[in-house]
Image (spheres, helix red, strand yellow):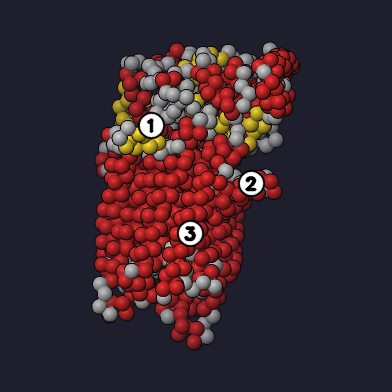
Amino acid sequence: MTGRDGKAIALHGGVIAALFALNFVLPEYHHGVLARVLVLAVFAMGYNLLFGYAGLLSLGHAMFFAAGLYGAGLPMYHFGWGVLAAFLSGLSAATILAFVIGMLALRTKGVAFMIVTMMFAQVGYLLVYYFGSWTRGDEGLVIQQHARAIEIGATTLDLTEPTTRYMTALFLFSVVLLVTFALVRSSFGRVLIAIRENEERTRMLGYDTFANKLVAMVASGAICGAAGAAYLILFGYVGSTFASIQYSILPLLWVLLGGASTTLGPLVGTVLMFYLIDGSGDLLKTYAPGWNISHLGIVGAALIILVLFFPKGILGTIRDRWARWLP
Amino acid sequence: MAFGPHLILATLEGLVTSAVLALMALGLSLVFGVMRVVNVAHGEFYMLGAVLAWAIASAFGGHPSIGFLAALVISPLIVGGVALVADRLVLKRLDYNPEATIVATIGLLYILQQVALTFYGPEARPVQAPFTYRVSLPWFGYSGYKLAVIGASILLLLATWFVLSRTRIGMIMRATQYDSETAQAFGIPVGRVYTGVFAVGAMLAAVAAVLIVPISQAHYLMGRDPLLLSFIVVIIGGLGSLRGTVVAALLIGVSDGIISVFFSPTLAKIIATFVVAMVLVFRPQGLFGTAAR
Amino acid sequence: MTSSIFGKKISRRSTLKGLGAAATGIVAGPGFVRYAQAQSSAPIKIGFQAHRTGIGAAYGRWYEKTTNAAIKAINDAGGINGRMVEVIVEDDGTDPGRGAEIVGKFATQYKVDVAYGTLFSHVVIGSAPVAGEMKLPYFVVSEGHHVASTKLNRYVFQPGITDVKSQIQAMAPWISAYAGKKVTQIFPDFAFGYDHRDYLPPALKAQGADVIAQIAIPPTESSFTKYFPQIPADTDVIYHVMVGPAVLTFVKELGEFYGGSGPKLFGFIDSLEAVDINSPGLEFLNGSHFWEGAPRYAQDNDTDAMKAYRAAVGIDENGASVDDPKDVSTAAHMFGCWETLYVIKKAMENADYKGPEDRGKLVEATEALTEFAEGPEHPQGPKTFNGKIHQCFGIQNISVVEDGKLKVVHKTTIEDGLYEPEGDYTTQPL
């Protein structure tokens, strides 16, 4: 058991250290890409907590990401809030929303849960338009560069500067990675897995499955909200696209690709999917110039191939075959 | 405009929406009822039906009704074929696992969209109605073709009902829906029934699309909103209940028309979606359905 | 002016400029020699953020055709500062998230000199922060008011097409004088519609006319008849700006609703870009009026420059592709691509632009531009440019649908569309 723990802790520390080291060696383009991908990987980790561990497949997680984006972005844009206050605002907005949605949606199961979450997310998407005078609907809002900085005493931490931005994203990523790592190995994490495997039996054993699922939902929503708030602060834009169904499907795809219910799967899935999309654009341009296949076409094909041939994703398959200790 | 005529117009519009919605949602409901598969790509079968209708109608010369009728026959057949292939290549291999099939049909949705974009293009293209006749009412004019769509939809719904409740095929389908394992034991080829049902579900969406395409145009992104509406209808009507589906389509279609008389349209959509989500939360069997199993 | 002059004249001037640029490099000192030579042979790279897929794909395709035609013309005439121009196209899927990633890719992977070409407002606004942070000049052809609102940043420009606020304001005098005093607006309930909702009423008021009803249609709507009873009976003009694929339905249903009678119609052609005006069901548009940036159909009084531009892009007298008469162009907007590329060229020449380290100079040189004369480089017409708000202002066309064609009946003046600047980008640091 301890050897297993040791390996897992070493692996997570190693990943964070490697990401830190990459800051100094990556070419400019990939450095910028990775900063973005780390934030999106946080989104995927939040999704994975609910989907991978508790076994609840939501089709509406865009609403939590968007709650973080708008929760942070609207006060920054309209009231000139600072970065930290805005981040907390986005985080709380998503957390509260996740609690309310959890109370309602967790009354349903399976397919009904998928559709209910999708409907609530659609309501959220339309609300962005309804409050168009505040959100500017699809056009969205830009947060000016000078507002995206933290003043600490006399020094200013400019979050738009590439290295600072990368380190901020890495910091958030590391915190969330370690929190999920601790969470899934705690007794709470084991209850979630038990619920996933057999909810009825878990309840018979005396666990309040609803309460445990609700906690998972709130934690998941909070993490996705943190990702949304960070995305806004680091990249400076919010628009209704991020509340659309597409952004509910992307985290599902990332998690499926990397491996559901593995702590590092979301990162692996997000990185690979980004480069798959980015690279496929170049490939298509070279070999099929007349074809209009957007990144969504690649997403579609990836989804089908994954679910048909690698339902456990990359790290899930590795765990099954070679590394049983992988968390 | 006075309130009375306004209401008449809203109701007429609602009926047209209902007519098309009922056909499309029936396909979704059938697939869910028999196979327990939520087909997220259903909207893309609808889109494909419309796009093919344009291709077929523009290949025929002469009177617009020739091209339209050809489209009404050929387009659903092709779409059914596509669905058949998708079932064999993907869904069957997933053993119709409900959650895996949702993910797979999301994938299918994106692929069909991109294929349409590549081969059909990004433009919205109209198909000429088989006839143009403007019904002049005292207060406003109304398209005669739209009234014909309502009639055609009723005929198709009756035909579907007849097949399901009065024929051997319908009995086999109902048996599979009721208990697929027992049906298998009694020698019903459940696999083939599933494939058939999936194809028929897609064909219903395609028929709905061919009927609508002279009213609204074929476009490669047109599948999304009808898909959401169909979901709403199927949920309200009770997952897998055919009678409920038709009643719910009427309710949703007509109320969509009438709500927009009183509310800001965007708010109306928000309220409708929210209410439906709440129905699913508190009454998962739907308003009209028997308990979903 | 003929098209042969069009080629030669620019060629000579550009070559001279190119020589001049090389000479300056050599004189500047030994450290610069190698550099200047390397630069003078390498092409200037323009990153073209194109809507190849997604909701903007119909526009994107024509933006790409126009861009290719303009680049060919520029290169045939000797390029920019004596260097050839190379366009690197990336599809943004008409998605602001992907759009931002692509501008980042242009700046750091391809290391382009400028980014260019975007149309849809949400993609422009979503990508603008990246352009500002990377200090990459970003030239958009969007017609949105976002650039001129000064809510973006110093690196974003719109020098090739008038913004929508100005367009709306320029329409008001004509609407009030020739169409009617009581106007009902129908617009989509998202940002493109908000511009019309907010800017038309004050502009009409100034002309003594009124907006008597505003009907916002939700973004997910696909049928419209049920909204028509909300149009007040005493409406003189319906002002419609529906966009997206549902617009054909909209017009058709309007026709069914009113039949031969009903208020006059005035609309923005945005609704019907890339759509054949003679499509079945659009008969109702006969006699109605449209805003057009550049006319879709060839007009009797077209200048030689306009004729040359249309020939270069490859559209026939009906504004459709010369290869396929069914393939209708987005003529009212795509001229902006052509003109923007010539503005980039001019600014680069004025700044004596050599490479990415001169981007600040390029921004200042662009801001220093004040007017563009009508001619081969600006076939749509003359324009003024306000460097403080990074926006150009040109003339607008009002056309009537007649015999299945759009015929220009009125051209506004540049002054019709001028408004008080809302801010000043030049005060922002470079």
Q: Looking at the picture, which amino acid does disc 1 mark?
A: His
Assign the N terminus of chain C to one quadrant of the image. Answer: top right
Labels 1 and 3: the sequence-earlier one: 3
Along the viewing direction, whichever of C108 and A175 lies nearer the viewer: A175
Looking at the rendered structure, which numbered label has been put on residue A146? 1
- In the displayed structure, would residue C374 be above or below residue A187? above
* Residue occupying image coordinates x 41% and y 61%: A48
Question: Do the dots labelled 2 and 3 sit on one chain?
Answer: yes
For disc 2, the marked residue is A282
Q: Secondary structure at mark 3?
A: helix
Q: Looking at the picture, which amino acid does disc 2 mark?
A: Asp
Question: Is residue A86 visible in this depiction of the protein?
Answer: yes
Horizontal relation, residue A82 to residue A111: left or right: left
Give the label, 1 or 3, closer to the camera: 3
Residue B136 pos. (x, y %): 40, 40
**Crowd tier of the residue under label 1, counting other residues whose Cα lies within 10 Å: few below 14, some 14–19, many 20 or above:** few
For disc 3, the marked residue is A14
Residue C108 pos. (x, y %): 56, 38
Horizontal relation, residue C393 to residue A71: left or right: right
**Crowd tier of the residue under label 3, counting other residues whose Cα lies within 10 Å: few below 14, some 14–19, many 20 or above:** few
Label 2 resides on the chain identified as A
Q: Is the Cβ of the residue at disc 1 closer than 8 Å to that at disc 3?
A: no
* Residue occupying image coordinates x 37% and y 55%: A175
How much space separates mark 2 and mark 3, taking CA atoms? Answer: 32 Å
